[in-house]
Amino acid sequence: MSNPPYAETPRMFVLLGGDRNVTDMTILPKRGAAGAADVDRMRDLFERRLARI
């Protein structure tokens, strides 16, 4: 099974998941992070576990 995809915009991370019939989408606004270092940590985590699109 391949890693689920995610995308990054200047303001948010968008995580996609689900199966063939249903697609789930989770939006994580970067403004919720305490600082730029937290955004960097989230990006590192996503890059290790998900496929960037």
Image (tube, grey):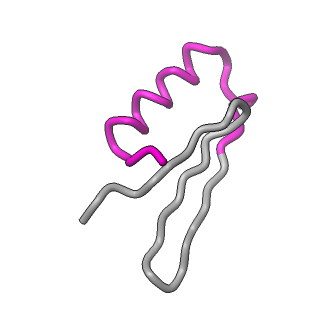
Locate residue 20, reporting x and y percent. Answer: 44, 81
Q: Which residue is drawn at 59% across and 38% down?
A: 8
- The count of marks equals 0
Q: Quadrant of residue 48?
A: top left
The residue nearer to you, when weighing 45 against 7, is 7
Choose between 24 and 6: the one closer to the eye.
Answer: 6
In the current view of this chain or complex, which residue is farthest to the front?
53
Work out which residue is located at the far left of the displayed protein and give it.
Answer: 1
Q: From the viewer's perspective, is residue 36 above or below residue 29? A: above
Most common SS among magenta residues: helix
Q: Where is residue 18 in the image (x, y as percent from the top left)?
A: 47, 71
From the image, which quarter does the N terminus lie in? bottom left
| Residue 11 in picture, x, y percent from top left | 73, 33
Q: Which residue is drawn at 53% across and 59% down?
A: 16
- Magenta-highlighted residues: 28-53
Please identify the residue farthest to the bottom as the structure is shown.
Answer: 21
**Which residue is found at the position 40% from the left and 33% from the top?**
45
Q: Which residue sits at x=43%, y=38%?
A: 46
| Quarter where residue 22 is shown | bottom right
Locate residue 10 relative to residue 40 in the image: left or right. right
Residue 39 magenta-drawn? yes
Position of 35 relative to 41 (above/below): above
Residue 6: x and y in percent read 50, 49
Q: Is residue 21 magenta?
A: no
Q: In this view, does 33 lie above or below 4?
A: above
Q: Is residue 39 above or below residue 49?
A: above
